[in-house]
Image (spheres, rainbow, N blue to C red):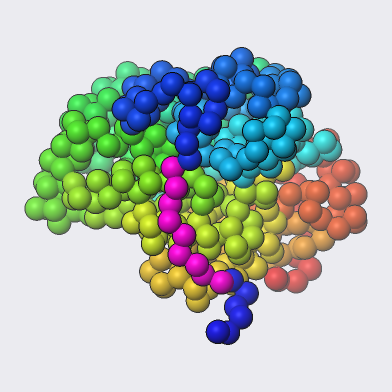
Amino acid sequence: MIRQPYQYTRTPLVEPDWRRLPGWRQVTEAQWRDAQWQRAHSVRTARQLRAVVGDLLTDHVYTELAADQVQFATMPVLLPPQVLNTMAADAPTEPGAFTDAFLADPVRRYMLPVRTDRHPRWPSHPRAERDSLHEAEMWAVEGLTHRYPTKVLAELTATCPQYCGQCTRMDLVGTSTPQVAKTRLLLRPADRQEQILDYLKRTPSVRDVVLSGGDLANVPWPRLESFLLRLLELGSVRDIRLASKAVVGLPQHWLQPRVLAGVARVAGIAARRSVNLAVHTHANHVRSVTPLVAEAARALLDAGVRDVRNQGVLMRGVNDTPQDLLDLCFALQGEANVLPYYFYLCDLVPGAEHWRTPLHRAQHLQEAIMGYLPGYATPRLVCDVPRVGKRWVHQAVAYDRERGISYWTKNYRTSLEGDAADPDVLDRRHAYYDPVDTLPEAGRRWWAGQAATPGPAPAPAPRGAA
C-alpha cells in the first residue's frame, strides 16, 4: 500500500459514557435523550461544572474558568451535557491526568475557555470589533442582514442552547458578560418576523434566506413553523437554510417527535414548491460527532430536508491540521450524513486571538485536504472579509506576510452606506489581519506601534501577493 500524508481508516462513532463523571452516575439513557433534561442540566458556572466533574479536575481549572468569565469572556458559559460529555472522554480518572486531558481537549478549548487559554500579550487583535462583519449596519429591518445581492440572513433569536467562545455574533447573542454589554433586539419576535416578511415581499431579487440567530433550536417550534410556512408562500424564495448548531450540541432537540413532525410538514411543502430546504450545523472537531448527532442528522434527512451541512470555524489548537480536518470531514460525511461545507477563518472579534489562524496556514490546509474526500464533500476554506463577504482563502489579491495584512476585493455592492454611490467600490481593497503572535518579529514590532492607534490600520503598499 502506498504511504500517504493522510491515511484514511474508517472509525465508528462513539457516544462517551456520561456515567464516568461523578455528577451523572445515576443518569439514565432516557434522561440523556430528553431535550428538556439536557437544557435543565446545562453547565453555566464553575460551581455547576464542579457538581458534574468534581475532584476529577483540580481547583486550578475552576479558578481559571471563573477568572476568564470576569476578565476576558465575550460569551457566557452555557454547555449542554451532550457537549461536556465529549470532553476528555478517554482520560484516566486520576485528577492530574484528567485535568491535563481536559485542558488539552479540542472541544473544551472553544466551548469552555479558561483564562490561561488567552494570549498574554494579544488577547484581542488591535483591529478586532464586536460586530466584526458589520452585519447590523446592513440590516434592512431589525435582524435582517442584506449583505449579498440575492441572499439575506434573518436573525430570529439572540440566544442559543450552547455558547461558543469565538462566536462571530458575540455583540448580539447571549447574555452580557463583565466585558460586553450586549446589543439587544428591540422588536417583539412576531413584529420582527412581520417586518422581515414584508421586506422579502418587496424585494423579489432575494431568493436565498438563511434563518439563524442565535440558534433556531431556541425558537419555539410552532412559531418557527408558522414563519416557515409564510416564507414558503413567497414565490421569489427558492432556498431556505435553517442554522442550528444544536444538531451537534443538542441533537436531542431535533430528535423530538413533535419537532420532526413539523420539519416533515414544512419539508413536504418545500418539495412540492421546488424550494431547497437545508439544515446547517456547526461541528469543529471529530470528537463532537457522536451517534446521537448522526441519528439527528439522519432523522432530519428522513423528514425531507435536502441536506444537512456543516459550517465550521478554523481554530488553532482545535482543527488546524490536515489530520484534524480530514478526520472530522470523514466522520461527518461517512458516518453522520452531514455534508462538509465551509470552514471559516475565525472572525476578528475581541478575545479570539489565540484561536485565529493566519491566512497562509488556511491556504496550506485547503491544499492539504484536496483529493481525499469526494469533490462535493471537500469543504471550502473561506475568509469572511469585513465589508466584503466570503472569499475562498486563495482569493486574496495581495498579502503582506510580514505584517499579516491580506487585501481583498468584492464583485457586488453591499447595502453598506456608500457602496451604491461609489464608482470604485468594486476595485477598492479591504484588509483582513492575521493574528499578531504568528507574525515575524518585525511584524509584531509594527503592530505594537499600531495597537494604541484608533480607527482602521494604515494600509501600506502591498509587498507582493501570496
Residue at position x 75%, y 56% in the image: 404
* Residue closer to the observer: 161 or 200: 161
Report whether 267 appears left or right of 88: left
* Residue closer to the observer: 425 or 5: 5
Whether residue 14 appears in magenta in the rendering, the answer is yes
Residue 140 visible in the displayed image: no
| Quarter containing the C terminus | bottom right
Q: Which residues are magenta?
A: 7-15
Q: Percent from the top left, x then y, of residue 99?
A: 70, 33
Q: With respect to residue 381, does 153 lie above or below?
A: above
Report whether 199 appears left or right of 54: left
Image quarter of residue 360: bottom right
| Quarter containing the N terminus | bottom right
* Residue closer to the observer: 407 or 458: 407
Q: Percent from the top left, x then y, of residue 76?
A: 57, 23
Q: With respect to residue 13, does 16 lie above or below?
A: above
Give the dominant element type of the magenta stretch: helix, strand or loop: loop
Report whether 28 appears left or right of 411: left
